Image (cartoon, grey):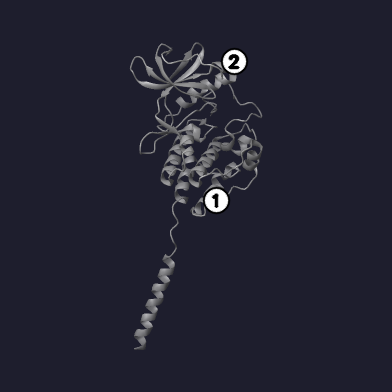
Amino acid sequence: MGSSDLSPGLVIDDRWELLSALATGSSGEVFASRERSTGREVAIKVMRADLMGDPVAVKRFEREAQATGSIQHPKVVRVIGHGHHRGRPYLAMELLHGETLEARLGRGPVPRERSLAVIAQIAAALDAAHDAGVIHRDLKPDNVFLLEGDAVDVRVLDFGYAKLADHLVGDGSLTAANALLGTPLYMAPEQVQASREVDARADLWSLAVIAYELVVGRAPFPSTTMADLFVEILASPIPPPSSIDPSLPRGLDAWAARALARARDDRFPSATALARSLADAARPERRRYGPLVALIALALIALALAVARAR
């Protein structure tokens, strides 16, 4: 990536002062920053200088601001401002404290109830995005942020690969034919096939993979090479959760079969529907003693009546 020309103390657009470097990603450098007029702390993401020669990369970065800003939902990271610094696009966003879901998973299993709460909040963010005409197309644990605190509080990040509805853009698609967009493990079959007809149901598939990983304890596709992984996504049977962990409720098997259906029409109709079905399926199974107890009680009553008549 090369050395950066950005450093703490630099003022962006006469408004934002960079305080400390937070991360460098595939498209930009992120700094904790301060709004000079108010003292408010924000996160500033500036496009990497080495990408400025790629007009598609520049346009994608600019669309990230447009996509994120068009979604008004508390579980989507909030864009505060955007512009250009020395010709390079930047975003000013709310400054988040905590860790990504990817980092949290790296520390071990997430308790079941917290996992379900995380999925429910991601689902709410996705449905809001889809209602606004935005398809994320790169939903993965590294683009889900967990805020500090005892309560689950999620933000969905990085809409750099987002597909926007026609009413939001007027200059055509940035997706070339046969272009693979997304992170392989979380890509829907139609993304693997590089279809330009990817719609909101691809995000539902990605959410299902994340949910499976959280609840079951591993991803549904274990291959580590891209070729084998794509074969699994496109053709291999989805392992029923109970086949991996027999202690899991059997209802999760039917949930996984629908959530990870290769035919898009067979998936859940919305992210919220997926999350609600998951919560129902993940409940501990009640022991089915009720009918047996009732039969035993009736038999005892009948026996008592027979004994009484015999007397």
Side of 217 relative to 94 (left or right)? right
Residue 304 versus residue 67 in the image, above or below: below
The answer to whether one can see residue 63 in this image is yes
Side of 31 relative to 198 (left or right)? left
Local secondary structure at mark 2: loop
Q: Quadrant of residue 174?
A: top right
User: Callout 1 environment at 10 Å: few (<14), some (14 to 19), or many (20+)?
Assistant: few
Determine the residue positioned at 55% across, 18% down. Answer: 58
Front-most of 119 and 109? 109
Q: Which residue is mark 2?
A: 53
User: Callout 2 environment at 10 Å: few (<14), some (14 to 19), or many (20+)?
Assistant: few
Residue 39 versus residue 146 in the image, above or below: above
Local secondary structure at mark 1: helix
Determine the residue positioned at 49% across, 40% down. Answer: 271
In which quadrant will I find the C terminus? bottom left
Where residue 29 sits in the image (x, y, percent)? Answer: 49, 21
Front-most of 46 and 202? 46
Q: Amino acid at mark 1?
A: Ile
Residue depth check, mark 1 versus mark 2: number of the one nearer the observer: 1
Q: Which residue is mark 1?
A: 244
Q: Amino acid at mark 2?
A: Gly
In which quadrant will I find the N terminus? top right
Q: Quadrant of residue 305?
A: bottom left
